[in-house]
Amino acid sequence: MTGSIMNDDDEESVLEESEEESRDVVKEAENLKLLGNEVYRRKCFIKAMDYYNAAIEMDPTNMKFYSNMAAVYYEKRMYLECIDFWETATDIGQLNLAESVDR
């Protein structure tokens, strides 16, 4: 069986494609958050949760998605869930700050 060997140009191309796909996922997750914000303003909290959950699934490293979920739970008077999501948001924020400082 013959294996293929990638040259430097091939590796760079694969990395560029991967980075572009990653940016697309982040952009789509951000769009879902914006849709969630729209329905949140109209007090459609269940639909907002659907959008925020979908955004979290696409990009679990964005603290804004978790803080928005916390806001929904707050509005629904589900305070324990609100606290859980808020704590996750702050944990992610601290991790992201640490990663940016380490660079």
Image: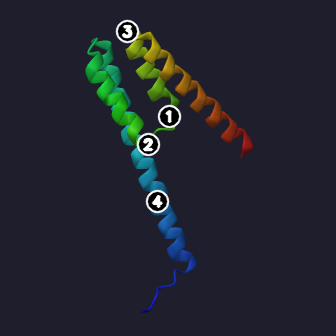
Q: Amino acid at mark 3?
A: Glu
Task: Please give the residue where the numbered disc 3 appears in the rendered image.
Answer: 75
Which label belongs to residue 62?
1
Image coordinates of residue 82 in percent, x first then y, are: 45, 16
Residue 18 is tagged as: 4
User: How many numbered tags mark residues here?
Assistant: 4
In-front residue for pair 17/62: 62
Real-space CA distance between mark 4 and mark 1, rounded to the nearest whole angstrom? 19 Å
Residue 87: where, in percent of width, then height?
Answer: 55, 22
Type of colouring: rainbow
| Tag nearer the camera, 2 or 1 | 1
Q: Amino acid at mark 2?
A: Val
Label 4 or label 3, whichever lies nearer to me, is 3
**Mark 2 to mark 1: distance in Å?**
9 Å
Disc 3, SS: helix
Mark positioned earlier in the residue sequence (3 or 1): 1
Residue placed at 26% from the left, 23% from the top?
Answer: 47
Q: Residue furthest right?
A: 102
Assign a secondary structure to mark 2: helix
The span from disc 4 to disc 3 (Cα, nearest Å) is: 38 Å
Q: Nearer the viewer, residue 94 or 21?
A: 94
Looking at the image, residue 3 lies above or below residue 50: below
**First reached walking from the N terminus: tag 2 or tag 1:** 2
Circle 2 or circle 3, nearest the eye: 3
